[in-house]
Image (cartoon, rainbow, N blue to C red):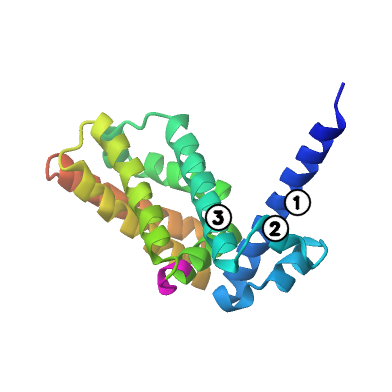
C-alpha cells in the first residue's frame, strides 16, 4: 500500500523534474537572462513560489538542470555505444555501413533535439557561472568516445576522440542550418569520421562519398 508520505515524495520529485525541464527549455531559448523564478514556474505550470521552495537561487537551478541534462545525454550516448561494438575496419572500408550507422544516430537525435542541446551547451559556455559545467560535459563526451576507441584498439584514443567530437559538433551546427539534406549530412559525417579513423588505425586511404 502506498503511504501518504510516499505520495508526497513522488509529487515533490515530479515537480522538481518539471522545474528542471522548464529551466532548460527557457535557457535554450534565451540564455541565462530568460531564466527567472517566475518564468520557470510559469513554464512548468506551477505556482510562482515553487522554484524558491526547491532551489535557493537561480544559479542553483541552472547548474542542477545542466548537470542533469549532461547525465542524461551521457547515458544516452553510452546506450548508443553499447548497441553494437563497431568493427572499425569495416567502418573504414564500407562507406554504406558507416553512413547507415550515422543515419541511425541522426534518427534517434533529430534536428530539433540536436538544436536544443547545442543551444544549451553554447549558452553554458558563454556564461562564466556555467562554463566549467559546459567544459565538463564536453570532456565527458570525449572521454566516452575515447574509452570506446581504446577498447577497439585505436592508438592515441583521447586525441582521436577529441577530433571525432569536433566533427560531430560541426555536423550538428550544419544540421541546424540545413546546409545539406539529412541523408547527405549523414554521408559526409560518416566519410569524415572514416578518414579520421583510417589515419589513426594505419594511415590507409578511404574512398570519397558518392
Question: Who comes first in sequence, dot 1 or dot 3?
Answer: 1
Image x and y of residue 122, in percent: 45, 69
Q: Is residue 198 magenta?
A: no
The residue positioned 44% from the left and 65% from the top of the image is 130
The residue at the point 64 percent across, 69 percent down is: 26
For residue 16, side relative to residue 79 (left or right): right
How far apart are labels 2 and 3 at the CA level? 10 Å
Where in the figure is residue 72, as x and y percent of width and height?
A: 54, 45
Considering depth in this image, is 131 or 178 the residue closer to the camera? 131
Q: Residue furthest top?
A: 1
Secondary structure of the residue carrying numbered label 2: helix
Question: Could you tell me residue 116's position as x and y percent?
Answer: 57, 63
**Stretch in magenta:** 124-128
Q: Are marks 1 and 2 in contact (CB under 8 Å)?
A: yes
Q: Which residue is mark 1?
A: 15
Q: Residue at x 72, y 72 (%)?
A: 39
In the rendered structure, find residue 64 and report the number of the disc placed on it.
3
Comparing 97 with 125, the one in front is: 125
Measure the alpha-carbon separation of dots 1 and 3: 14 Å
Q: Earlier in the sequence, mark 2 or mark 3?
A: 2
Locate the C terminus and report the quarter of the image it occupies: bottom left
Amino acid at each position: 500500500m502506498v503511504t501518504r508520505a510516499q505520495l508526497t515524495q513522488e509529487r515533490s520529485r515530479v515537480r522538481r523534474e518539471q522545474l528542471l525541464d522548464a529551466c532548460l527549455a527557457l535557457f535554450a531559448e534565451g540564455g541565462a537572462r530568460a531564466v527567472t523564478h517566475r518564468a520557470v514556474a510559469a513554464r512548468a505550470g506551477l505556482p510562482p513560489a515553487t522554484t524558491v521552495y526547491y532551489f535557493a537561487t537561480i544559479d542553483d537551478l541552472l547548474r542542477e538542470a545542466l548537470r542533469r541534462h549532461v547525465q542524461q545525454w551521457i547515458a544516452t550516448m553510452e546506450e548508443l555505444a553499447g548497441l553494437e561494438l563497431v568493427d572499425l575496419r569495416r567502418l573504414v572500408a564500407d562507406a554504406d555501413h558507416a553512413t547507415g550507422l550515422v543515419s541511425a544516430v541522426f534518427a534517434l537525435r533529430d534536428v530539433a533535439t540536436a538544436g536544443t542541446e547545442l543551444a544549451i551547451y553554447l549558452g553554458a559556455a558563454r556564461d562564466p557561472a556555467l562554463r566549467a559545467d559546459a567544459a565538463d560535459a564536453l570532456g565527458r563526451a570525449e572521454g566516452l568516445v575515447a574509452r570506446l576507441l581504446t577498447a577497439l584498439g585505436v592508438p592515441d584514443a583521447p586525441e582521436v576522440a577529441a577530433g571525432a567530437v569536433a566533427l560531430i559538433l560541426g555536423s550538428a551546427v550544419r544540421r541546424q542550418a540545413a546546409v545539406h539534406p539529412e541523408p547527405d549530412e549523414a554521408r559526409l559525417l560518416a566519410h569524415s569520421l572514416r578518414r579520421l579513423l583510417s589515419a589513426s588505425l594505419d594511415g590507409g586511404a578511404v574512398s570519397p562519398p558518392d
